[in-house]
Amino acid sequence: MNVGKHTGGTKLTEEYAKLHGKLHLVMPLDEQPKPETVTQWLEKNDILNINVGEQRESKYLKDIY
């Protein structure tokens, strides 16, 4: 999950996933993502386990709360 430009850990994680041929999906929270997007992606790729990461609260706290 991400708000704004991919930086820091989000960017690094995405780069590593691509480098190692791992599936990844970055959800832009500032674009009001639809839950169906995740569900369809999981089903399409037959994914049973996921790792969910997000930015530090300090980066997006003012935008969400």
Image (cartoon, rainbow, N blue to C red):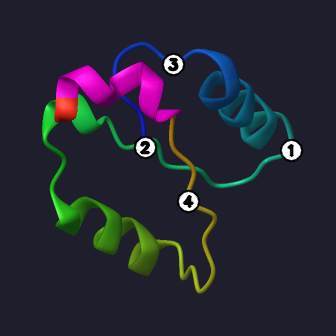
Q: CA distance from mark 1 to mark 4?
A: 18 Å
Q: Where is residue 52, by image quadrant?
A: bottom right
Identify the element where label 2 is drawn.
loop
State the image coordinates of residue 43 (x, y, percent, origin top left): 41, 80
Q: Earlier in the sequence, mark 2 or mark 4?
A: 2
- In reply to whether residue 62 is colored magenta, the answer given is yes
Q: Which residue is mark 3?
A: 6
User: Could you tell which of marks 3 and 4 lies nearer the N-terminus?
Assistant: 3
Residue at label 4? 52
Q: CA distance from mark 3 to mark 1?
A: 19 Å
The label number, if any, that marks residue 20 in the structure image: 1
Marks 3 and 1: which is nearer the front?
3
Element type at mark 4? loop
Q: Callout 2, which amino acid?
A: Met
Label 2 vs label 1, nearer the camera: 2
The residue that label 2 is drawn on is 1
Q: CA distance from mark 3 to mark 2?
A: 10 Å
- Relative to 7, is 10 above or below? below
**For this rendering, which residue is in front, 20 or 31?**
31
Q: Which residues are magenta?
A: 56-63
Q: Amino acid at mark 3?
A: His
Q: CA distance from mark 2 to mark 1?
A: 20 Å
Q: Quadrant of the N terminus?
A: top left
* Residue at 19% over, 47% down: 33
> Which of the two labelled residues, at mark 3 and mark 2, occupies the earlier sequence position?
2
Q: What secondary structure is the stretch in magenta mostly built from?
A: helix
Q: Are marks 3 and 1 in contact (CB under 8 Å)?
A: no
Where 20 falls versus 63 (above or below)?
A: below
Alpha-carbon span between mark 2 and mark 4: 8 Å
Instruction: Categorize mark 4 by other alpha carbons within 10 Å: few (<14), some (14-19), many (20+).
Output: few
* Residue at 58% in and 15% down: 7
